[in-house]
Structures are given as structure tokens and as C-alpha cells.
Image (spheres, helix red, strand yellow):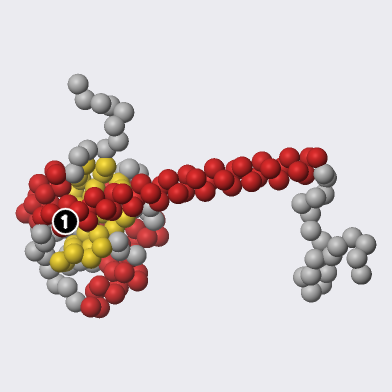
Amino acid sequence: MKDLTRHRHKVLVTDDEEYVRNTIKRALRAIEDCVIVTASNSTEARRILETQDDVEVLISDQKMPGDSGVDLLSWVKLNRPDVVTIMLTGYADLETAMKAINEGQVFKFLTKPWEKDNLVDVVSQAIDVYHKMKEAKRLLKERNEEARRIIEELEATYPGITKVERDEAGRIILDGVE
């Protein structure tokens, strides 16, 4: 019987060439509990990302009809910053790599043809980074809630302790100090 509590990792593969999508799907079977969804263009990928909030990693080709991979990664950066992105292209050039890194905050940049083991390693690393970022956000939220609770307790015990008065120049005014 399958363990239903186990987490499944969702990877979105976007490439206009079906054989590339299928080859990547086959390669990523090596990653345990990895679910692969595919899109043939940026528009389809955006639709998936807008409706499926459990996508952890996006692999995108650069050259596709319509929007480029860099355009898609830039959209992901603004709308789904939690998704870890990988650029895959057969047309590696410095300008494309720089745009992917600077505009789309790409995690890794891979060229076609790729080594299967390298692809699997890179996607595994991306999944790991996704979960580390998610845990870091959870811990930060927890710490912020704890700090807010402590401040509320201090304010309840010592009314006004968290209020700071400033003069016109922005300097803190201390009671009784000239």
C-alpha cells in the first residue's frame, strides 16, 4: 500500500518540442516521489503555475514560439518567487545566460544536449533548495510571531514601552534628558 503522507515533488517542464519533454520526464523518474507536468509554451506554463500552487521546480527551454524562456522566468520571479527555476537551451550564449540570471533569477543554466545524471542531480538540488527556502520562511514567520507576542506582553505590562518619540531631525527623545 502506498504511503499517502509522503510528499510528492512537482516539476513543471516547459519546452515546445514534445520529445524533449518526454525525454526529461523519463530521466526524472530517477527522483523518488517526483511528479512531472508539462507545458509546450510559456502561456500554458503560466496557466499551470496559476492553478497549481504545489509546483516546486520549473525547467524551461529558452527558445519557444511566443514568449521566451527568459520571459517566463521573469514572470515566475514576480508571480511565483517560491518556484526554483532551471533554464535549458540548445542555444547557449552569454547574453541569454546573463538575462536568465539577472531577470529570472535562474537557479541553474543547462545546455542541450544534457547528461542525464547531471539533469537529475540539478533537479534534485533544486527540490532541496525549494524545501530549504520553504523551511526558512516558516521559521522566520514563527520568529516574527514570537517577537510580536513578546512586544504585546511588554506593552501590556509596561504601557508605552514600545512607543518612541522623535524630534524634527528624527533623533530619539529620551524623557528627562537634555
Nearer to me, 109 or 18 = 109
Q: Residue at x 31, y 55 (%)?
A: 84
* Residue ranking furthest to the left: 19
Kind of residue at badge 1? Leu
Task: Name the spot of residue 148 as percent of width and height, x first.
Answer: 65, 45
- State the quadrant of the N terminus: top left
Q: Write the residue at 71% across / 45% down.
A: 151
- 10 Å neighbourhood of mark 1: few (<14), some, or many (≥20)? some
Query: Which of 40 and 135 lies nearest the eye of the viewer?
Result: 135
Q: Residue at x 83, y 69 (%)?
A: 167
In the rendered view, does 156 fall on the left or right side of 49? right
Tell me which corner region of the image, top left, top right, bottom left or bottom right, holds residue 70: bottom left
7 and 43: which is toward the camera: 7
Q: Which residue is mark 1?
A: 119
Q: Can the viewer see residue 40 in this picture?
A: no
How far across and how far down the image is residue 132, in percent?
A: 38, 49
Which type of secondary structure does the marked residue at label 1 adopt?
Answer: helix
The image position of residue 117, as x and y in percent, is 13, 54
* Rendered position, 142 above or below 122: above
Quadrant placement of the C terminus: bottom right
Image position, residue 106 (x, y; %): 30, 63
In this rendering, is residue 94 above or below 45? below
Residue sitting at 79 percent across and 54 percent down?
163
